[in-house]
Image (cartoon, rainbow, N blue to C red):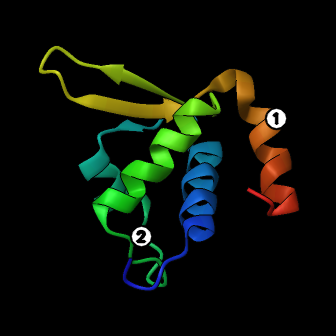
Amino acid sequence: MHGSSRAEIVEALLSYLVENVDARDTLEGIVEWWLLDPTIRPNPAEVKRVLDELVAKKLVLEHKTGDKRIHYCVNPRKKKEIQALLKRRDV
């Protein structure tokens, strides 16, 4: 995992989404653009596992586009729940 814990990835993704509520991107875009913190060096497979968990919890939504690529975005109905999770740092 190149030194990143699952919790660090979860926190980084949810923090990014709370601060950028209109953000929507593919797995590749998320790894390249959303996780810019130099202390977080996740591999795409680990980020995908985290995204799958967040989708299962309905904190993140996934949308298939016409080219069959999956784009991820925050579930706006869960924004307060996400903020509470980030405050507790128990994600």
Quadrant containing the N terminus is bottom left
Q: In this view, does 64 lie to the left or right of 6?
A: left
Dots 1, 2 in contact, CB < 8 A: no
- Decide if residue 25 is in sight here: yes
Residue labelled with disc 2: 36
- Considering only order in the chain, which callout, 2 or 1, is on the residue closer to the N terminus? 2
Q: What residue type is labelled 1?
A: Lys
In this picture, is 14 found above or below 36? above
Of all residues, the one furthest to the left in this rendering is 67
Residue 62 as seen in the image, left or right of residue 88: left
Q: Mark 1 points at which residue?
A: 80
What residue is shown at x 80% (from left), y 50% (from top)?
85
The picture places residue 16, in percent across and down from the top left corner, at 56, 53
Q: Helix, strand, or loop for circle 2?
A: loop
Q: Is residue 22 at all visible to an observer of this figure?
A: no
> Image point 79% across, 46% down: which residue?
83
Give the side of residue 66 with respect to residue 10, left or right. Answer: left
Q: Which numbered circle lies on residue 55? A: none
Q: Residue at x 80, y 60 (%)?
A: 90
